């Protein structure tokens, strides 16, 4: 079959497109601004489309090209309409036609569509009469926002005007409905592409604060005022000149980045992923500092622009938001004056005209207003914010008076809307004048996959999360409510990570910042010591809870004594939970709250605090219940021996009925066949795998069990190796199934148990086969460009009977098996394991003993363990 031959007009257009892109690429590399390059790219597209329009008009039977184009109008819209096209953008066209010309218009459109596709462009098109176009736009927010940015390209000017003029008039008449429809559509998109501006891998077109934010101003400007251009909106006085410049500069910056992404990819690309961030940081000459990577500097610049867009867009949107009918009618009746200048309504707090004119530019007055808004849990109304924002834009140094310090601490003392208000202060750049360390942290990215926010956003988010604990009905909520000096806790949260971005450990730098802040606010010596301690040791509780065996009462006692008294321990507990919650959605899950709460309550008991839990009494109670349950059974003596040997951690974590079930299965276990049981734990969102066997039958049981579990595409979160009486081993693995979200299907669970059983009974101790996982090129590039270093730490102080080996390295397939196998080959037995994985980084902790089941005290052997593990893991990367 002969190959299809492209039309001559298409071949010419393809050549023109290729030549145009190459020319634009050279101009881009020469430093042509983003807006200018996009306009030139649009000119290139226009030339191609016009040639193809002429060719398609020639193809309509029964009409001359002139007659065809007199009954059609070619209308670019969306990005093509506003002349913002990137090198590989779509071409969005609306083809308007006279009502009696539809069949011929369809013929024309099919030819044009095919030709545009053959040229190598992606055409988004619609075929409508002017009336149909206006009706469609009024009924659908997506269509409206796309058509709002339209322009005439070819055909009948009269036909174009029949659409454009009524469209503008109807939009202004229907502003209220359009406003809510556009906002709803944007909320849905933002939820998909990034609700917050500080996302790790933002979509440069659709994430918060990006090009979409600028477009929102244009779309709503058209709906309200009939204008999309920022210059026109500025002339009308609805956007300040400063805001216009912020949007203008951000638009040029973002378009240049987008052009670079697409030239580099050779296709449409809007995702600023980690590999691209690294590449662009190098390309644009960021060199980094001792405490900041080049990519972190690059992203700090990026976030400065997107934060500016977000703030301007939000301010503009608030300024034109239609008032609800309810508020308009009943708001004045439901508003009361609480101060000479403050008026509290059902939803908002507003200010008098006198306050706006005389006091809005004074920081103390703004803090007074915020305290009132926080106390009454009301939003500050937009007219007030508008005046405050105008007064403080570009303000220089501000002297902090005793009154300012007192008012700021008073603001921190009430939960209310504290997070929202601090965020507003930060947007106004006032927070950094009160707490200078916030200036360094502004838009500061942590280049890892764990934190979802920049340092400044994370610190404020942790306060917001802490205030939300107020409504919890568990221990965490009760403890937060009971804290007397909430202002001190909130201040610690605000500054706890401000030490990041320096070469020194961020907790140590942060502790110095805490001392400076304490002196600045004239805190008492006791409060200064508490603030210093909370910042310096803000990671202590999480590291202990998730990297150590907290069934060791001596370890918990030492933690309690070091972090007391009781009020300070309360603050550390809430701070730790808030720090987890402020990392990103779902980071603080029910399981983590339970683990941290258990450690807190046991520590409080040791300190003699109010929230006490007697772990020894609970242990005795559980042992008594187990003893009663096995009374009169066959093998009662065996059951009692095994029950008496149960480790504290196993007893604390496991319900009585589950312990009995495990022991019954152990009792029935055949000599040469291990017991394998799987149970989904909805409270932790994990699959619990219990494996029982005899230690004498399986030397190096831990590495074999690890291989069996991980080879089934299970991510191990924690492992407990429990050695019981009579040489029994009862291990528990808490895992997440990589193949299923939530609870795995029953057949999957059965298959896992069978495969693990088969692997354990194989007489050959062979390495398991791990299923290969696909890794994108960009992900590999990012890992290679900024690899996570491998570090081995030995802790011989924490545990009395064990040596603790900590492994920090980059995650990879089969890693846990590799480590556990090396420990076995070095003659070490694993008794407790804590596995922590943060997407691309792992922290694995192992409690080990030597061949005689003793703690390793030989310093030379400890050094060999450290060296061999480190070298082997580095070589295997």
Image (cartoon, rainbow, N blue to C red):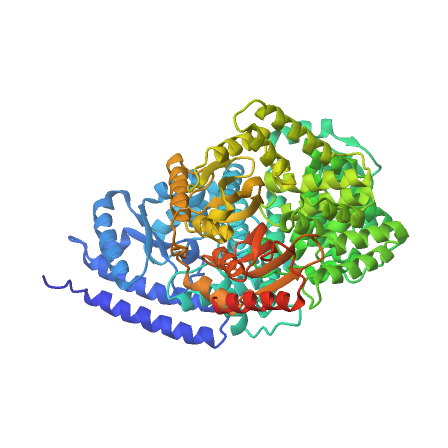
Q: Residue at 69%, 31% (x, y): give it.
A: 620
Q: Residue furthest top?
A: 632
On the image, the x and y values in percent for residue 868 come to: 55, 68
Q: Nearer the viewer, residue 494 or 130?
A: 494
- Is residue 844 at least partly visible in the picture? yes
On the image, the x and y values in percent for residue 120 come to: 29, 62
Q: Residue furthest left?
A: 1
- Is residue 370 at least partly visible in the picture? no
Q: Locate residue 813: give its quadrant.
A: bottom left
On the image, the x and y values in percent for residue 303 come to: 60, 60
- For the N terminus, give its image quadrant: bottom left
In the displayed structure image, the side of residue 625 where residue 35 appears, left or right: left
Asked if 590 appears above or below 66 in the picture, the reply is: above
How many numbered discs sit on the rendered protein? 0
Q: Residue at 56%, 22% (x, y): give it.
A: 632
Asked if 376 appears above or below 434 in the picture, the reply is: above
In the displayed structure image, the side of residue 41 where residue 318 appears, left or right: right
Q: Nearer the viewer, residue 253 or 793?
A: 793
On the image, the x and y values in percent for residue 242 come to: 65, 60
Q: Nearer the viewer, residue 84 or 133?
A: 84
In the displayed structure image, the side of residue 119 where residue 873 appears, left or right: right
């Amino acid at each position: 079959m002969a190959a299809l031959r492209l039309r001559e007009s298409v071949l010419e257009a393809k050549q023109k497109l290729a030549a145009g892109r190459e020319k634009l690429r050279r101009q881009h590399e020469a430093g042509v601004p983003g807006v200018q390059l996009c306009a030139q790219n649009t000119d290139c597209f226009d030339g191609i489309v016009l040639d193809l329009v002429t060719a398609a008009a020639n193809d309509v039977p029964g009409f001359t090209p002139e007659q065809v184009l007199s009954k059609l109008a070619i209308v670019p819209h969306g990005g093509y309409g506003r002349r913002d096209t990137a090198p590989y953008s779509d071409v969005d066209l609306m083809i308007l036609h006279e009502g009696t010309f539809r069949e011929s218009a369809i013929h024309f459109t099919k030819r044009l569509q095919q030709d545009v596709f053959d040229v190598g462009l992606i055409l988004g098109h619609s075929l409508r009469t002017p009336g149909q176009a206006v009706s469609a736009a009024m009924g659908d927010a997506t269509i409206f926002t796309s058509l709002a940015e339209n322009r005439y390209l070819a055909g009948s000017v009269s036909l174009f005007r029949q659409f454009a003029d009524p469209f503008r008039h109807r939009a202004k008449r229907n502003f209220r409905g359009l406003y809510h429809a556009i906002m709803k559509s944007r909320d849905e998109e933002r939820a998909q592409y990034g609700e917050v501006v500080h996302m790790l891998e933002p979509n440069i077109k659709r994430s918060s604060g990006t090009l979409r934010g600028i477009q929102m101003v244009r779309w709503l400007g058209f709906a309200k005022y009939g204008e999309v251009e920022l210059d026109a909106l500025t002339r009308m006085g609805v956007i300040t000149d400063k805001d216009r410049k912020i949007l203008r500069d951000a638009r040029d910056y973002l378009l240049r980045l987008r052009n670079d992404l697409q030239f580099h990819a050779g296709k449409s690309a809007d995702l600023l992923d980690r590999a691209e961030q690294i590449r662009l940081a190098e390309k644009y000459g960021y060199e980094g500092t001792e405490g900041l990577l080049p990519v972190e500097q690059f992203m700090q610049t990026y976030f400065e622009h997107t934060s500016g867009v977000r703030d301007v867009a939000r301010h503009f949107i608030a300024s034109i938001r239609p008032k609800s009918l309810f508020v308009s009618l009943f708001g004045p009746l439901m508003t009361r004056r609480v101060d000479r200048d403050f008026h509290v309504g059902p939803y908002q707090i507003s200010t008098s005209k006198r306050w706006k004119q005389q006091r809005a530019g004074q920081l103390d007055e703004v803090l007074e207003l915020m305290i009132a808004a926080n106390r009454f849990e009301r939003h500050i109304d937009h007219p007030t914010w508008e005046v405050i924002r105008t007064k403080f834009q570009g303000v220089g140094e501000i002297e902090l008076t005793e009154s300012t310090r007192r008012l700021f601490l008073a603001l921190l003392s009430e939960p209310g809307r504290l997070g929202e208000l601090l965020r507003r202060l930060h947007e106004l750049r006032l927070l950094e004048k009160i707490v200078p360390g916030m200036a360094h942290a502004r838009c500061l990215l942590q280049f890892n996959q764990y934190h979802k926010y920049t340092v400044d956003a994370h610190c404020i988010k942790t306060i917001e999360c802490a205030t939300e604990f107020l409504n919890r009905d568990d221990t965490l909520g009760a403890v937060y409510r009971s804290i007397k000096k909430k202002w001190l806790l909130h201040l610690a949260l605000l500054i706890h990570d401000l030490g990041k971005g320096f070469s020194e450990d961020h907790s140590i730098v942060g502790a110095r910042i805490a001392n400076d802040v304490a002196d600045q606010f004239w805190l008492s010596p006791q409060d200064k010591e508490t603030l210093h301690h909370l910042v310096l040791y803000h990671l202590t509780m999480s590291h202990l809870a998730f990297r150590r065996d907290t069934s060791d009462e001596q370890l918990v006692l030492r933690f309690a004594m070091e972090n007391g008294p009781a009020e300070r321990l309360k603050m550390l507990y809430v701070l730790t939970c808030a720090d987890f919650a402020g990392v990103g959605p779902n980071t603080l899950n029910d399981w983590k709250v339970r683990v941290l709460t258990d450690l807190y309550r046991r520590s409080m008991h040791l300190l003699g605090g109010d929230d006490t839990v007697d772990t020894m009494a609970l242990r005795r109670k559980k042992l008594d219940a187990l003893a009663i349950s096995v009374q009169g059974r066959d093998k009662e003596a065996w059951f009692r021996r095994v029950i008496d040997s149960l480790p504290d951690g196993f007893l604390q974590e496991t319900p009585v009925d589950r312990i009995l079930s495990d022991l019954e299965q152990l009792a029935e276990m055949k000599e040469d066949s291990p017991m394998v049981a799987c149970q989904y734990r909805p409270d932790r969102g994990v699959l619990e795998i219990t494996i029982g066997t005899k230690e004498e039958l399986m030397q190096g049981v831990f590495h074999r069990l690890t291989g069996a579990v991980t080879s089934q595409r299970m991510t191990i979160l924690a492992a407990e190796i429990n050695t019981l009486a009579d040489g029994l081993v009862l291990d528990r693995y808490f895992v997440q199934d990589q193949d299923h979200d939530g609870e795995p299907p029953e057949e999957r669970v059965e298959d896992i148990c069978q495969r693990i059983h088969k692997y354990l009974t194989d007489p050959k101790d062979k390495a398991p086969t791990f299923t290969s996982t696909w890794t994108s090129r960009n992900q590999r590039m990012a890992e290679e460009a900024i690899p996570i270093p491998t570090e081995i730490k030995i802790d011989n102080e924490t545990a009395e009977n064990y040596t603790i080996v900590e492994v920090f390295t980059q995650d990879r397939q089969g890693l846990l098996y590799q480590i556990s196998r090396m420990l076995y080959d070095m003659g070490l037995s694993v008794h407790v394991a804590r596995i922590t994985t943060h997407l691309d980084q792992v922290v694995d902790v192992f409690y080990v003993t030597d061949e005689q089941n003793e703690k390793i005290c030989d310093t030379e052997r400890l050094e060999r363990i450290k060296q061999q593990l480190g070298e082997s893991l580095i070589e295997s990367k």
